[in-house]
Amino acid sequence: MKILQLSYRLPFPLKDGGAIGIFNLTKAYHELGHDVTLLTFNTKKHFIPENNISKELTSICNLITVFHDTSLSPIGAFFNLIINKSYHISRFKSKPFELKLIEILSKNTFDLIHVDGPFFASYIDLIQARTKAKIIIRAHNVEHFIWQKLALNTAFPKNIYLNILAKQMKNEEIECWKKADLIAAINQNELHYIAQFVGNEKVKMLAAGIFLKPNYISTTPRIQSSCFYIGSMEWMPNKEAVDWFLKDVWPLVISKNPSITFYLAGRNMPQKYFDIKLNGVKVIGEVESAETFMKDKQLMVVPLKSGGGVRIKILEAMAESNAIVATDLAADGLHTVHQKNIIIANNATEMADRIIELMDNQNSLQQLRTEARQHAELNFDQKKLMQSFLNEL
């Protein structure tokens, strides 16, 4: 097939879940023999000069980028509040992008238009007027869920504004789903939710996946009593999670077992975390390779309180044979089983106790690591997931 993929950001470098999720879909299409054109915003926030874009991306698709500044603007946010439109979607309206899209559609015949997220809602009518190709929206998550959960965890009066953002996003997200030919949901919970608005036939599962090394066995020595968190600190739910963990969970851990060390890594790490002086906490900041960072640690903690979709970083950690302690929300969509291939802990005391128990029992820790790797192998091979999805189509 000839596929046109529209992305709201350049999916490179592969240092956060958003970029990895988009890149893995492009790579899966390519490895299955499909011809992919990737039209993407090269935003100010994630800007990469064209001559610096890795061949790892350009070798799997015909890459076309359009620069666009999606930076937050108080004036823009206020204006969208007045007209009751989602500011997060309106930030992706771009005349140069629209003209490039029209040019591509006029010169090519595509079988499938793959749209990453609801941010292209304003372009759907344009696409449908110029092609007979089927339009699939990849719901990397239900965006308005994120804002609803952030509002629930935020104090007055900021929660009022976040609730307004959530309602605006919900209205436009649902309208976007209705216009598309198919929605590719990332987990069963979100599939059932989306189906309420568009019907069961218009929603199919395409779980998030990763590319696993075959027959991989971890041989890197692990730092004893080491746990870690890694995630892009540009994303509000990640900052919320880290703040909660350091404030409510970590003091309980270190008071009972001062030998445990917590490593914190991620892009755009706020200075406040480097300034925090907590026993046993090592703030690393951005790392060149998440895989390298993970492979000598024992335990990943994922204390998410808000967010949606699937945590790609958990899958990557499982692939590296890391044990995982996470909230129910963080594990959503991963088909994990508590105490078999993951440990679920939803409050501070539970999470602290589970971390301590695993560090005190290396046999249990090793078993959890082994089961996590096997779970990733059986359920999250991206190429197999994509083939199954396309077969169903």
Image: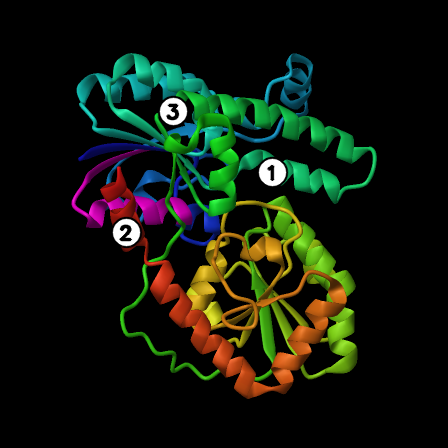
Q: Judging from the image, what secondary structure is the residue with disc 2 in? A: helix
- In magenta, the rendered stretch is 21-40
Q: Which residue is mark 3?
A: 180
Residue 119 seen in the figure = yes
Furthest residue to the right? 156
Q: Is residue 223 above or below residue 133?
A: below
The reply to whether the C-beta atoms of the residues labelled 3 and 2 are less than 8 Å apart is: no
Amino acid identity at mark 3: Ala
Colour pattern of the rendering: rainbow
* Residue displayed at 55% across by 36% down: 143
**CA separation in Å, label 1 and label 2:** 33 Å
Report crowding for label 1: few under 14, some 14 to 19, many 20 or more residues within 10 A (C-alpha): some
Location of residue 289 in the rendering, given as x and y in whole percent from the top left corner: 43, 63
Q: Is residue 371 above or below residue 114?
A: below
Magenta stretch encompasses residue 31: yes
* Residue displayed at 60% across by 51% down: 233
Q: Which residue is mark 2?
A: 56
Location of residue 175 in the rendering, given as x and y in whole percent from the top left corner: 49, 21
Q: Is residue 114 above or below residue 237?
A: above
The reply to whether the C-beta atoms of the residues labelled 3 and 1 are less than 8 Å apart is: no
The reply to whether the C-beta atoms of the residues labelled 1 and 2 are less than 8 Å apart is: no
Amino acid identity at mark 1: Phe
Q: Which residue is mark 1?
A: 145
Q: Nearer the viewer, residue 15 or 169?
A: 169
- The answer to which image quadrant residue 102 occupies is top left
